[in-house]
Amino acid sequence: MSERTHETAPSEGDEETVVKPVVAVVGRPNVGKSSLVNRVIGSRQAVVEDVPGVTRDRVAYDASWREREFTLVDTGGWDTNLSGLAAQVARQAEYAAQTADVVLFVVDANVGITDTDEAVTRVLRRAGKPVVLAANKVDGQRQEPEAMALWNLGLGEPYPVSALHGRGSGDLLDAVLDAFPERPRISDEVEESGPRRVALVGRPNVGKSSLLNKVAGEDRVVVDPVAGTTRDSVDELIELGGKTWKFIDTAGIRRRFRALQGADYYATRRTAVTLERAEVAVVLIDVSEPLAEQDIRVVEQVLEAGRALVLAFNKWDTLDDERRYYLEKEIDRQLSRVSWAPRVNISATTGRHLARLVPAIETGLASWDARISTGRLNGWLKELVAATPPPVRGGRQPKILFATQAGVRPPHFVLFTTGFLEDSYRRFIERRLREDFGFEGSPIKLSMRIREKRKGGGKASKGSARPDWKR
């Protein structure tokens, strides 16, 4: 499990936290915005496919150039004459441009200036933000005259680049850095460890993006009935329940990676990485349909990542009595392994019971962070073992010598024993830990350190080293 990373925190005595400059990458569909983003950040994180409209949300990445750090925001294709899903994508791009410090406007030099490019230029002028013009797909000197034609947009010098080959990207980034504001922005709030990170996960089309938009109070991400609309992980800072949270809306997790192709394949892989970045996962389940194997797999991935867990049953307002009866049976049968997870019955569309979401998240995080002192743990364990000893195995009864909590996030307990403890007995210990100490909403990791017998048998000599232990 990776170590928990913190947001940039002020040094001792500081009263303000500097916010990294934000660069929004905008342009009409299929001009190479995501390819350029990948070139700048130096890895293939933005989804790229040779069809327009792959990127549908604002997606932020950490980037740096000449030792200057900034946030790069990839956006969906910006077209001013669209409706439906495409219009929502365009609004996301416009929102990104309004909130950025610098706008990187990407135009296809081979196509030249289109009506959409001119319309976008007018919107950017109204926004009043510094604009750096990238003339993309200039792979050689013979194409540079085509790039120079983009002077006619009236946005200043066009920088010829090839996102595919990296040609001209250094000059482009120099121009971006020159456009940064002289005085860095200062954040309004300072929290030592930054907002707690909440991942919204679930199989495709269960309402993750709808839930994010509802708790945000505005359309932050694209929502469409078509499954798989979200292909990138989207981080949003949202005020909820009197606190700031970082919500991460993810691409729907699908069971078989190998069955996926192109953009959906890479998006699904990144969803697993998103769980590693989060602290608590809210698993959305569509109650209007029977629980599926994909739902169970999502829960398993959260457990494998060791993250706190909240189960959010979406579309609860659509249930009739018969469906509710069978759903309860499905939950008892298929989700018994995570009966300790807080459960919230919600409607992402109407906002039903969303007020219960924050207490459930806080409960899971408190358990995820919880620690039991060694003295208290061993006093409890001594009473437990005296009342219910471990079962005999191979003619011998293993003894639990002592225990310690090796870590948190999630809580990890190590049992030092003289022999192997059966799975059933370890599950018994975990169940009693939950009954007596709580840990609602957090997985518990329980491992053993078994004392090995010394060669030759008998007791260790008085001056011998400590006993040997094996995991």
Image (tube, rainbow, N blue to C red):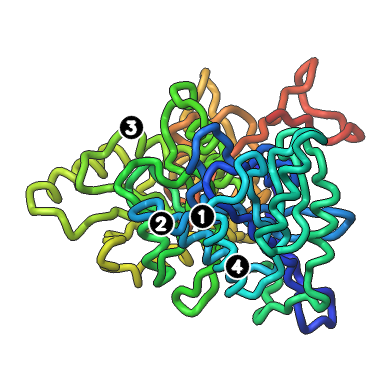
Q: Is residue 376 left or right of residue 207?
A: right
Say the numbered circle drawn on residue 234.
none
Q: Amino acid at mark 3?
A: Glu
Closer to the eye: label 1 or 4: 1
What residue is disc 3 on?
Answer: 293
Task: Kindly report which numbered mark, 3 or 4, lies closer to the viewer in this rendering.
Answer: 4
Distance (Cα) linking label 1 and label 4: 12 Å
Q: Position of residue 394 (x, y in %)?
A: 52, 18
Circle 3/circle 4 CB separation < 8 Å: no
Badge 2 or badge 4: first in the primary sequence: 2
Residue 116's disc is 1
Earlier in the chain: of badge 1 and badge 3, it is 1
- At label 1, counting other C-alpha atoms closer than 10 Å, the crowd grade (few under 14, some 14-19, many 20 or more) is some
Say whether residue 359 is visible. Answer: no
Cα separation, mark 3 vs mark 4, equals 47 Å
Contact (Cβ within 8 Å) of mark 1 with mark 2: yes
Residue 162 horizontal/vertical position (percent): 74, 39
Q: Secondary structure at mark 1?
A: helix
Work out whether residue 287 or residue 108 is closer to the camera in this orientation and state it. Answer: 108
Q: Does dot 3 land on a helix, a strand or a loop?
A: helix
- Which residue appears at 42% of the width and 61% of the height? 212
Residue 335 lies, with reference to residue 458, above or below; the image says below
Q: Which residue is mark 2?
A: 81
Amino acid residing under circle 2: Asn
Q: Tell me the distance, in whole angstroms, between the alpha carbons under discs 2 and 3.
A: 41 Å
What mark, if any, has residue 124 been given in the picture? Answer: 4
Distance from Cα at disc 1 to Cα at disc 2:
8 Å
- Relative placement, left or right, of 301 versus 333 is right
For mark 4, give the secondary structure: helix
Image quarter (top left, top right, bottom left or bottom right) of the N terminus: top right
